[in-house]
Image (spheres, grey):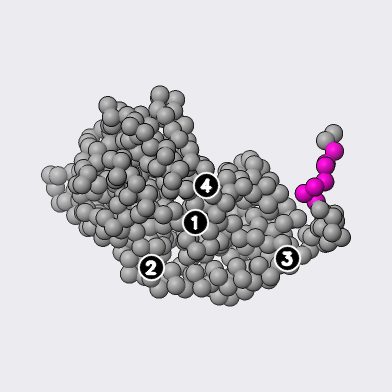
Amino acid sequence: MNLPIYLDNNATTPMDPRVLEAMLPYFVEKFGNAASRNHSFGWVAEEAVDYAREQVAKLIGADAKEIIFTSGATEANNLALKGVFEMYASKGNHIITCTTEHKAVLDACKHIEKMGGQVTYLEVKSDGLIDLGELENAITDKTVLISIMYGNNEIGVIQPVREISAIARKHGVLFFTDGTQAVGKVPVDVIADGIDLMSFSGHKMYGPKGVGVLYVRRKNPRVKVTAQMDGGGHERGMRSGTLNVPGIVGLGKACELCMNEMESEGTRLSAMRDRLEAALMQVEEAYVNGNREHRLPHTTNISFKYVEGEGLMMGFNKNIALSSGSACTSASLEPSYVLKALGLGDDLAHSSLRFGLGRFTTDEQIDFTINAITTSVLKLREMSPLWEMYKEGVDIDAIEWAHH
């Protein structure tokens, strides 16, 4: 077994060699610009893009014409939120989202507030799910969009997408979902799920970085967005810029592989994840964060009380790549805002580890990880005065700490 072990597949995935193979010809021999309509180099590129569009559409139950290629999910999120806000300004200026969304959604919403938009940020329950009653109560006659992610990047919780879309439909509001962690991992069907707009990214599904998608529904209702990038009118006028042909080819291939392998892969990964979780829950005072029933198959987030997350990472980060509850915006040592939104205290939020399993994760790697993490936690607790006090029966939460 080779070290280090990679268990941070929610951050990015390694490219599947089959994806690389599909992409390679488009760098050198078939290098044409898909918008060059006058010669065979352009036609070959355009044909490759059209084929990829079909592959992508098929994975999510969409029509190829509804697929807009972007540089990634961050751009797709911005295009969806700002594009709908501008396009439907005559109808209203109110957007509803939730506190545990990805930064790309939250920061785009902050920008919209500066532009005069109203944004409601729904809290989540302690298991990470939104309250559907609160969602419905937040809708006003000015609401143009509900933006709730499909699966959470930190805790893996899957929101009740169909119920959300039913509420949106009932009130004539558009429903956008950030599908970045869910597409390719769990069955997503834009028609059955009632999704009007959805973003996702190549590099979260064993495809290349720097390419993503915004799905924009064409009928019942026909959705329009105002372009955020102007130029040659590419992508049906919604996103100008020369298409990243090799990237798009790779994304198409990645979608096709996910379509064919998702079911068996999901079964294998959730079994591995459950085994990892069960073993780590044998450690005293370990807690799984987020709903354990409605969640992605490859993700678990576990807090180990009385252990510092950063210290814990130091114990094994030469051998295992993970992210800790304070690492997503890791320039800061702020505890994860997602875990705080679940109501976790700083101590538990700081002592959490996110495990993101993937296509190339093996049972052997899981065994090694169980062993390494259990050992690290026990070792750190041996040195922790808090752990000693806890073992002696002191109620640590009741202690008044002196502030110097």
What residue is drawn where x is 81% and y is 53%? 395
Which of marks 1 and 4 precedes in the sequence? 4
Q: For the residue carrying disc 1, how many other residues have a C-alpha within 10 Å: few (<14), some (14-19), or many (20+)?
A: many
The residue that label 4 is drawn on is 124
Q: Nearer the viewer, mark 4 or mark 1?
A: 4
Decide: marks 3, 1 in contact (CB < 8 A)? no
Q: Are marks 4 and 3 in contact (CB under 8 Å)?
A: no
Q: Which comes sooner in the sequence, label 4 or label 2?
A: 4
Picture residue at 21% right of the left edge, 43% below the top: 222
Quadrant occupied by the C terminus: top right
Circles 4 and 2: CB distance less than 8 Å? Answer: no
Q: Quadrant of the N terminus?
A: bottom right
Is label 3 in a helix, a strand or a loop?
A: loop
Q: Residues within 10 Å of mark 2 (few under 14, many from 20)?
A: some
The answer to whether residue 400 is magenta is yes
Question: What is the C-alpha distance between the residues marked 4 and 2?
Answer: 28 Å
- In the rendered structure, which disc, 4 or 3, sits on the residue that comes first in sequence? 4
